[in-house]
Image (cartoon, helix red, strand yellow):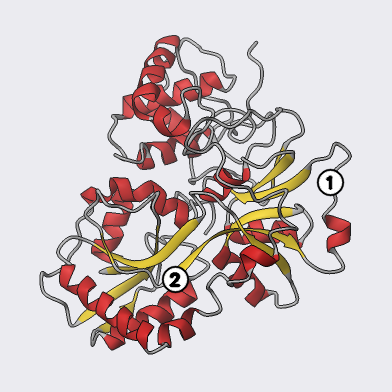
Amino acid sequence: MNIRLTQVALASALVAGAAQVAVHAAAQTPSSVRVCTMPGSPSAELDKSVARAVLSTAGIAATFASRGIDDNGDDDGISARELSKSLQRDCDVIAGFPRSSVADGSDSQLLFSQGYLHSGYVSIALRGDHAANTNVAAPDGRITIAATWSSPSQLIAVEQKNARFDLETTSKLTVDAVAKGRAQRAIVWYPAVVAYRRAHPQQHFDVAVAESPYADWNLVFASGPGTQQLQKRIDGALARLRSDGRLAALTRNWALPATIATVSATSHASLVRSPARYLDGPTQPSPRANVWRVSGMPAAGGFIKVAATTEAPSFDHDQVAHGEHLYADSCAKCHGEKLEGNTAPSLIGPAFAPAANSHLTIGGIYQYMSTNMPADHPGKMSDEEYADLMAFLLYTNGYDTGNAKLTAQAAQSSTTPLNAGPRH
């Protein structure tokens, strides 16, 4: 997966902008289809098994793409445009597309099947003899909670009180943070726990449901315009598999155990809370010093492979002023009026720009922002506007203005880590 949005975060970011997706699909049900899975998905094995059973039951031959959606070997994430290209080039239907009430894609041209796996985000802690040694708060009373960066996992985790945070780049590393003792708890996508246990059968966790509007998800089949008949056949096959028990047999080991919510509720009461402040206000700011620790990041950092530079690119005051207006118009509704985070992660403070050892580069942030944001219309701004918005983000995170303007090329090619600090 490298440095990418998790498959669930990807769905959240893409569905609003997927109206531009156009796939190569006939109006009638095809006799065969090409199937892709989501990039880096821990449920890819399940998704393929369900797809084989569903399409076979529907009388449709299936071939599986040798790579996932835009799985081209780089680490630049994925945008709605890249999704469109992958659908045209590699597949006709996506198996394992995550969908929820907060990312239902109702305004897009993507078509969705019924759900075949109801899952979500959970809180996990180490179980057994090692738990006594690792599940202990620091002298200041804080515990360390692992979460997957730029995903619902992070949104849920940052609402927890009295905690430090260990941000990881993948859900696998998030589980591993608990297993290896880097964190006492974690908020993570449940199929990632299942996949981790399959690779490490000796590892056991206590698991509790994370109660949040961002925790509840279903895996579905997704396809583009003109595939209504295909989705109708898929839904019919899912209904047959559900009625004869075959779907339950396929998904049994991946579904949330019915006992999770009750058995583990007491032990996780201090961590798992009812929905708090996601939709009705910002989170409280965390102290900058000695709170956020980022691990598991490649030494180069960032979302993309970029040309080497050694210093932060220059930007001027006019760009900051214009970027502030752009932010208020297109970004504040999700990221907060003061960049503090609302229904999307904070763009200021240690979660975004730590004082040192950042896992994000300026070029990586610019590339991700310019191809994926805003979520309801990715790529809608010009290169100059994205550069001005980047200037505003740099300024609000401690960088000083200069005399030269920030260009899109300079922003994208910067490998300078985003380490915030006081202005001089």
Residue 308 placement (x, y as % from top left):
53, 37
Q: In this image, 315 relative to 165: left or right?
A: left
Residue furthest out toward the bottom: 244
Q: In this image, 401 relative to 160: left or right?
A: left
Give amino acid for label 1: Ala
Which residue is more in the foreground, 395 or 374?
374
Q: Residue at x 73, y 41 (%)?
A: 163
Q: Residue at x 50, y 55 (%)?
A: 6
Q: Quadrant of the C terminus?
A: top right
Q: Please, what secondary structure does the residue beneath circle 1 have?
A: loop
Residue 91 in view: no
Residue 117 placement (x, y as % from top left):
44, 71
Q: Is residue 174 above or below residue 360?
A: below
Q: In this image, 416 relative to 63: left or right?
A: right
Tell me which numbered mark, 1 or 2, is placed earlier along the sequence. 2
Q: CA distance from mark 1 to mark 2?
A: 35 Å
